[in-house]
């Protein structure tokens, strides 16, 4: 099994969710994150003190998938998250040794 | 102080003025809590700037245009009181100092433009909005206040004094006026990116409830204070304000429960504001039972009205039309039905044997203010849009107007304050010099 | 206005009424900040709905039951003022219009049921709570207000007017009354899931502090306003209110420091409220030094009392008993000790040479209101629980009552608004049609 | 009530006192929103504790020291009114009860120390701060209030009554006084860890705006109420307060736009406060146009002044010096230029033909209060620092003062309340016993 | 070494912490997350606009363990997090190449 | 490629960012987290109820790097995050199978 992690722009979540649904994946876990990269931040001013904010809000989406779906799923996520502008984010995959559904104790593909 | 002066009435109007003043911050919170977190500050700032701009204009010429001696036909005041010169410390309006009256009326002039801002949440350039406030106050509010609120023995404003339109505390001059302007600006600026598609839920309902609480509180100054005396009329206006607001909250909640299956707190707050709006013109002429009727009708009608914007494709973002225009029209017209003839005003409405006369006068008031405000607001808004631009760029709207227009974030709750770096104005040299002197940071 | 009328007194009572009104939103924030984030809105809504329901009932029959001419034995008013008919605009209560008095007293009738809600935080169905408020106001508050606050030359309420129980501003009628009802409802509804086990820390102490600030502010209207005149008695009540509150805050903080090792802001806020409660019955009869004593005692005693609920297994969630019942009893009884006999009332307490007489009368007042309220509240609560149900299902409590009862979330601070999708009411056809017209979303 | 009594004036002063009271919570929010989330509660508590401490001291001896008959040379009051004994219920100060006057002045004594706390945000031990408040009120505020506010036909305070320094509502006694003390404490406590290096942006600007809204609202009581009568002077003070505040907001925003490229909401709030500060001494002696000038100057000057702290390496954390000291000095001196001579006071300023006389008197007032407060505050602060310690340990500052000093967290918005475990005081035995009786938690 | 990640219902954290403690693991890292899966969300209403909220609050717990403890630890976590109702979450494990304790620079098992 | 995850004290983020920048890594993703470990928490009191708060605020930093830089980068992060006091946190690395830049679809090292 693989764990696909996608760091995306917050307002693309809906598209990613829809695309996954269409692809047949019905679960994911999201965390709020801040990203630092090529995308420039902005400047803030508070009583004469100027700050550069170089972290940009992102969402971090995690999806467990069966090995054979991984490659295709990455494509699906990348496509759904893309706006074509700097800061669109990254998607990566990591090998998973075992996965369990807490409710039932099922393992592997059945856990999804 | 001269004869006819009443310290009691004066105390009442002073405090009423302070109460009306606090409605504008209240409105800022009411609106500010309803938008998404990324445009909170812009929403707050649009109300606060009205406090600044209108106050200065009022002293310079606004008071004179609104309450100076009529310049002709009841359309506008003359320039006798430019800069508030010539107003003697002890001169009276009724039983109170002119300064008290001027301060009280100023607060109305402040909140009216602020009300408009709800229609264009999330997308108006702050400088353009500020310009709009200055212009709108000058060419719309000051004249309309003269029409409705300036009484001078039949030689005053053409609506209130000359034609007997009843507007005790501003159903036409404030709410219809602002509501029509909101409609115009919503059309001029257009729909927000993602309207009807993206989730746009309120970022802080406690802030909304705070706003509605302060509005309700201040509204006693607005309505009862409009008696300009601490007397029985003010007392009736006070009771009517409370009970109409209560009834409207019940009406809105009932409608929402039937239509959407839940009693929401936003519905409670919205219903209360709808009731406050509707009773504003009527609080000096109906009985408490009449006030319950006015409130109930307004609560249900406004709750129904706000749904229309999605059907019509009109992005009146925070329902200035649905609440202030609709509520103001309802309240103003219901005076023609429910005025008892023996509360504050002697004209009786249809249900109290007064015939259709007063109803006709109310229609006149509603139509005149609505039309004037809509047309002028549309012209002003369009002029600004075509010249310096009124709406922000789309990417600003998406990433959040607070950052682009105010260079601030509304909140920072993280343990992090992440990714901030001081850049200025501590000049490099100075910073370096003093950094050495600073205690070692041994965290 | 008729003879005996005072514009100054009237102005004072109007503004005092507005101040008491703002206490109910203040209470909403005080309570709302103390609960977990998932039941914030329910807590706010339980207070706001009291504004709506009680106002309408007051006009319909509440005012008449409480302040109509006595129907017999000082137990309740008659129905002369149903719908507030027959109340002339210029009729007076003392030196102020009847409407001003009615508005002022209405605000007391609103906040009293709202106070109760703290005892049943996180777990009461909103519709059932609303019904409870309507019933409780009708069969508990209106009569008790008559007992305590209706004066008619010895022909008024049986406690205040006929038996000389001193309750200047509502120690019995408001605080003991609400506290006893809170105790009853906490018993009827039972403990929250996770009581004494799960962490239940306040989700926003700034909101609590805002609530306490507004309560303190409004309480000057509550207490000083109860003089119903802007005079020396009101002045003494004002000073006493301030200093007792201050002393109670110090008392609570000192207790907390000794017992738990920290000066908490929640303790400061709670101490202030305890002081305000305790001085409420006493502010018109003690000296400023007496007020310091009352405050100190109340601050320490209430701080000690709130700990008991964990021992007793009583989930009085936000300490309505510990603060309002205990504080109200303390304040009411201390009148019997500290009344000087020459502030607002002429009866002197034990420490000022008045013997045990007044103390006995105070015990009567405390006992009567406590018992009546507890029994009736328990009956009403149980009746509601057995019929339509009062408590939400356990899974609703765990996932959060705001979602289930109000279909809302209190806050959305995320950059995300995550996982929301518009579902309605933009009807599919309409949405599709207009979607085409919408500018391309090029984010 | 005795002759000369006015119920209208009394009503006005009561409500004004309540308005000034609510400024202290307002200040707490204004300051509290500006600090990082980890020291929010400490910031709130530093203001709230002033309500508690100063109120009790006021009744015990403060009122007597400030407003008791002069003990000699206009320096301090005698001890005639210790414990507020001997103050008859119906005794008058001018046209209002002594109690009303005492309550009103108490609120000034409360907010002044609270203002100081902004200079030492994030790093002051709460117990030490509390001690400082008690000492500072006793040896600085009470005497200075006597100097400035105690009038007794030329036998009163040496600055106001004997030397004709004009300070209508507290530019010297409140703002310069607090500002100079803030400067002293900022020096005594030293810079925060990370000053000029770490990001320290406000954690909640809506909270700041709420604070500024309440301050503005309450300030009408502060300024207009200082007329101690509901009359024309109060009216002029009211109008001047509003318009100077408005002009200062515009001034600050314009400066910020030019210097930093943005209109910030924090700038709007700060400008408003700067304007309120500057008009405080002047509101009873300038015309509305003069008030606009005072406001504009103060808005720009304070906006410029706050930048200096980074250059000077002075960690006046929330700009008590930049806003209250600078604004107070500007307002006090401008009286010497803009006093018209026929508003509240008869002395005219330089621009109104009064010559340099009044300006000289204003310089005296400014210098005397500034020097006295700075020296005494520095001595008190240093004494506390050397004995019980004033500043918290560095690791407390880094991890957050709220935890260490108050054992609380300001917010808990998580679905989590993570990592909390009840530890006490539910004693193990009791908990076990009742746990069995608890319904099974079937989440 | 392994990294065990558990997505659980928020109110089970206490139980999981206690179970780990009993098992002898004395460290973990938690982040707030939102989950999307079989568990249905709810509907919200704001001035006539209805929204379906289909993300549910979850906690994401990460635990580094030695290889030999991993399998057993998964069982412990699954058991502690279980309520038996839909939405109980997932637990998965991923191979870790190296782990360091920042304070000391210790590596591998010593880093825990 | 590797994914380096660092759980650090919040106020060390700036130092870590600077060190990465100096090292030549120009991207990272941060999430807020709470950590449980040797570092003790604190006690809170609310109206007589005492709570032990044993989760401490941390930041969780993720950095994708090429295999050959991983070891050195770990050192850089560990050094930048270190204060020498208990609770400094952990750094670990996990093998990544593929990484994609969403904007362009680039894979592997080019995705960074
Ligand atoms: N080396 C990295 N490791 C982890 N996350 C990264 C890395 N580089 C970038 N990111 C994440 O990807 C986001 C987008 O990267 P950025 O360089 O701004 O744009 P793009 O991916 O379009 O070139 C960043 O905000 C950050 O969250
Ligand atoms: N494919 C997946 N990848 C990552 N996380 C998942 C996945 N499926 C489910 N989850 C997480 O597990 C949680 C529970 O899943 P859900 O399907 O609701 O219930 P259950 O696990 O009991 O069948 C979700 O809320 C989500 O956080
Ligand atoms: N076994 C673990 N798995 C995951 N994270 C851990 C583990 N142990 C500790 N941590 C994280 O590392 C942080 C620091 O650990 P701690 O034991 O407090 O100090 P130190 O690392 O200095 O010994 C913890 O707050 C937690 O976030």
Image (spheres, coloured by chain):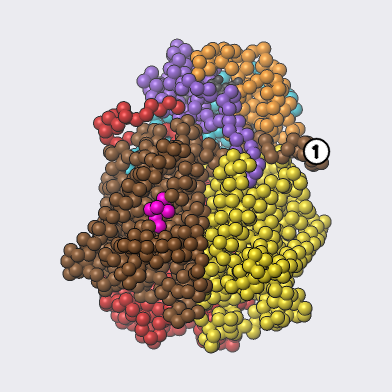
Chain colours: A orange, B yellow, C brown, D red, E purple, F cyan
Q: Main secondary structure of the magenta part?
A: helix
Q: Nearer the viewer, residue B82 or F72?
A: B82
Residue for point 51% across, 84% down: D345
In the image, residue B113 sits, relative to residue D283, either above or below, namely above
Q: Is residue C331 found left or right of D236 in the rendered image?
A: left
- Residue D253 magenta-highlighted: no
Q: Which of D378 and C300 is in front in this view?
A: C300
* Residue D37, horizontal then vertical, whole percent: 48, 46
* Residue A82, horizontal then vertical, whole percent: 73, 30
Report how many numbered discs are placed on residues in the image.
1
Magenta segment boundaries in residue numbering: C136-142
* Residue C187, horizontal then vertical, whole percent: 34, 40
Residue for point 82% across, 56% down: B386
Q: Quadrant of the N terminus of chain D?
A: bottom left
In the image, residue C375 sits, relative to residue C385, either above or below, namely below
Asked which secondary structure carries label 1, the reply is: helix
Q: Nearer the viewer, residue A84 or B337?
A: B337
Q: Is residue C43 found left or right of B350 in the rendered image?
A: left
């Amino acid at each position: 099994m693989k764990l696909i992690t996608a760091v995306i722009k917050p307002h693309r979540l809906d598209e990613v969710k829809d695309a996954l649904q269409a692809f047949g994946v019905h679960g994911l876990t999201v965390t709020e994150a801040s990203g630092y990269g090529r995308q420039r931040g902005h400047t803030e001013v508070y009583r004469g003190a100027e700050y550069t904010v170089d972290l940009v809000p992102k969402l971090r989406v995690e999806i467990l998938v069966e090995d054979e779906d991984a490659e295709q799923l990455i494509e699906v996520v990348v496509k759904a998250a893309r706006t074509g502008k700097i800061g669109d984010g990254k998607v990566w995959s990591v090998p998973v040794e075992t996965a369990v559904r807490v409710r039932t104790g099922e393992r592997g593909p059945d856990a999804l | 102080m001269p004869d006819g002066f009443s310290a009691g009435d004066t105390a009442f109007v002073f405090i009423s003025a302070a109460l009306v003043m606090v409605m504008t911050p209240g409105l800022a919170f009411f609106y500010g809590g309803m938008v998404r977190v990324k445009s909170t500050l812009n929403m707050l700032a649009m109300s606060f700037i009205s406090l600044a701009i209108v106050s200065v204009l009022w002293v310079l010429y606004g008071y004179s245009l609104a309450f100076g001696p009529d310049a002709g036909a009841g359309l506008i005041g003359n320039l006798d009181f430019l800069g508030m010169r010539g107003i003697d410390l002890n001169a009276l309006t009724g039983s109170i100092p002119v300064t008290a009256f001027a301060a009280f009326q100023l607060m109305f002039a402040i909140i009216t433009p602020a009300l408009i801002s709800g229609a264009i949440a999330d997308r108006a350039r702050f400088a353009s909005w500020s310009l709009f406030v200055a212009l709108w106050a000058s060419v719309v509010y000051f004249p309309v206040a003269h029409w409705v609120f300036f009484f001078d023995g039949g030689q005053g404003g053409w609506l209130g004094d000359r034609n007997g339109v009843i507007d005790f505390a501003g159903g036409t001059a404030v709410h219809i006026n602002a509501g029509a302007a909101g409609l115009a600006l919503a059309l001029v600026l257009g729909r927000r990116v993602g309207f009807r598609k993206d989730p746009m839920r309120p970022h802080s309902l406690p802030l909304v409830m705070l706003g509605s609480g302060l509005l309700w509180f201040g509204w006693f100054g607005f309505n009862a204070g409009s008696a300009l005396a601490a007397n029985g009329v003010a007392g009736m206006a006070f009771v009517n304000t409370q009970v109409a607001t209560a009834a409207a909250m019940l009406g809105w909640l009932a409608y929402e429960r039937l239509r959407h299956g839940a009693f929401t707190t936003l519905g409670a707050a919205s219903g209360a504001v709808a009731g406050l709006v509707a009773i504003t013109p009527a609080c000096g002429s109906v009985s408490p039972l009449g006030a319950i009727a006015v409130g109930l009708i307004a609560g249900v009608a406004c709750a129904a009205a706000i749904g229309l914007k999605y059907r019509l494709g009109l992005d009146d973002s925070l329902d200035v039309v649905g609440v202030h225009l609709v509520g103001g029209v309802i309240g103003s017209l219901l005076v023609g039905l429910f005025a008892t003839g023996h509360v504050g005003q002697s004209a009786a409405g249809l249900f109290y044997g007064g015939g259709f006369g007063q109803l006709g006068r109310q229609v006149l008031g509603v139509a005149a203010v609505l039309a004037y405000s809509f047309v002028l607001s549309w012209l002003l808004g369009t002029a600004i849009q075509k010249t310096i631009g009124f709406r922000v760029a789309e990417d600003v709207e998406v990433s959040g107007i607070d950052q682009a227009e105010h260079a601030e974030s509304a909140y920072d709750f993280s343990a992090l304050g992440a990714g901030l770096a001081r850049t200025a104005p501590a000049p490099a040299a100075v910073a370096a010099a003093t950094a050495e002197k600073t205690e070692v940071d041994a965290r």
